[in-house]
Image: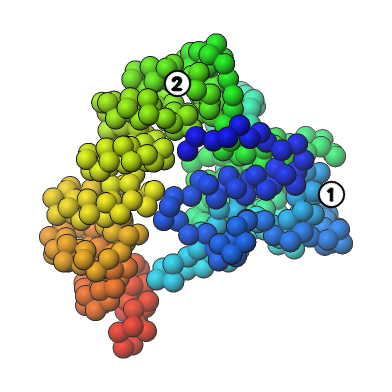
Amino acid sequence: MARSRELPADDLAGLLRQWSDAQLAALDALDRPVEAVARTGSLLLPPATEAQVADAEKRLGVRLPGSYRDFLLLSNGAYGDTIGAVMAVDPRAGGSDAGLGFLPVTEISWFIEVEPETVEIWLASQDEIEETRGVPDPAPTFERDEVRDYRPLRDALLIARGFDANCSLLVPVGGPGEEWEVWDHYKEGTTRWSSFRAYVRDTVEDHLGVDVDEAEALLLLASAEEGDLQAVQRVGRVRSPVATELLLDAARRGVVPHPVMRALTRIGGPDVVAALTDLRLNEWQQSYAHRALALIGTPDALDHLASVGAYLQLSQVGDRRAAEIAAARLRDGDYTTQLAAAHVLARMPDPRWVPDLLGAYDRATSDGLRVSTLGALEACGAFEEARRRAPDLLDGPYGYAAQAILIRLSGRTGGIEPHTP
C-alpha cells in the first residue's frame, strides 16, 4: 500500500478525480462498485448546467455555497459521498443502489422536510446537553472533527441519502455568502468539514498521506498519546519512512494502534512486515496489525496471516485461503467466529462449503447464526437446501430475512408463496 509522493491537486476538478480514486482505493477486494463505476473507473457524473443549478436555487430559495456549486457544475452528483463509494447490490439481496451517493441537483432538499423527526430528536438532545452542562460544547477546530452543536440541522440541506440513518448534509454555520459545512451524519453522531472543497481535499489527503521529518513524527506521536485528536488523525496519514522506528515503537506499546497501523501500512517494506508479524497485542489491537499486513500484501505478510488464521483480513484482500480457514472456524469456532465465517463464505462462495454450512445450521442454537448460514448456502448455490430451511425462521426475530431469502429463491425453486404470520 506504500504510495508515491503524489500531493492533493490545487484545483477542484483535479481534487475530484483524486477523491474518486481515493474512495475506490478504500474498497476491499471483494467489494463491487455499481456497474457504471466499474465501466468508467470513476465515481463522477456528467456536469449539471448553470440553468439546472439556478432552478434548484430558486426551488430552495437559497444560493448554494461556492465550492458545492462548483462541484455540481463539474459532476452532477456522484456514485459516492461522505460514507464512501456506492456498492452494487447483489441481486440476491433484493435491494437497490438507486438514490445513493451525492444527489443530482434536482434531488437535493431541505433535511427537515425529509427527516423532521430526526431533526427534532437531535435538537432535543442538544437542549438536554446544554441544560446539563450549563454551557455549549466548544466548536470543532479541525477538518473531520466531531460536531458538538446540532442546532444548525434545522437549516441543513440533504445532499446524499445513505443507508439506515447515515446521510451527507450541507449545513450553514456562517454568514450570507460564506461556505457551508459538510456533515457526515450517522446514528451515533456527526463529523464535519468546513466546506465541500475542504471535505474533498481532506479525503484525498487521508488517502495519499503526508510527509513529515523525524522531529515532526515524534511530536505528533507524543501529542496523540496525550489525547490530541487532531494529532491522532494526522499520525494515521504519515507516509515518511523516517518515521518507521518511532511508529513501530508506538505499535509495540499499543499507542493509538489504529492510526499507527495505518501509517505503517503506507510505509510498508520488509522491516515493517517482520516487526508486525512479531507483535503480540490484545485481540482488537492485533486485528489492526493483521489489517496492515493484509494491505501491505507481500507473500510473507499474507503467509503469516494464513498461519495465524486471520481469515477476515485475508478475505478483505481476496486471498482464497480465507475461505478455507473460515470453513474450519465454522466447525469449531464460537458464535461470533461462526457468524464472521459464514459472512466470509457468502462473499467467497463455492459449493465445497455447503456440507460445512449445513452442519453449522444444524448445530446452531440461535436464529442469527442460522440465517447467516442460509445466506451463505444461497450464495454457494445450494438453493433447495436454503429454501427448505428458511421457513423454520419465519416466526422468529429474523423472519424478515428468511422471508427475503424465500422471495429471492422463488424464481429458482418453483414459486414460493410469501409467508404470512
Closer to us: 391 or 245: 245
Quick one: label 1, few (<14), some, or many (20+) residues within 10 Å?
A: some
Q: How is the image coloured?
A: rainbow
Q: Which image quadrant is residue 102 in?
A: bottom right
Residue designated by label 1 = 63
Query: What is the three-letter code of the residue carrying label 2?
Result: Thr
Tell me if residue 236 comes above or below residue 355 in the rendering.
Answer: above
Q: Position of residue 306 (x, y in %)?
A: 25, 43
Q: Position of residue 22 (x, y in %)?
A: 58, 44
Q: Is residue 352 left or right of residue 263?
A: left
Q: Position of residue 72 (x, y in %)?
A: 76, 54
Residue designated by label 2 = 244
Query: What is the three-letter code of the residue carrying label 1?
Result: Arg
Q: Is residue 354 left or right of residue 297?
A: left
Which element is circle 1 on?
loop
Q: Which image quadrant is residue 382 in?
A: bottom left
Closer to us: 256 or 211: 211
Residue at x 47%, y 29% (from the top left corner): 267
Tell me if residue 194 comes above or below residue 327 in the rendering.
Answer: above
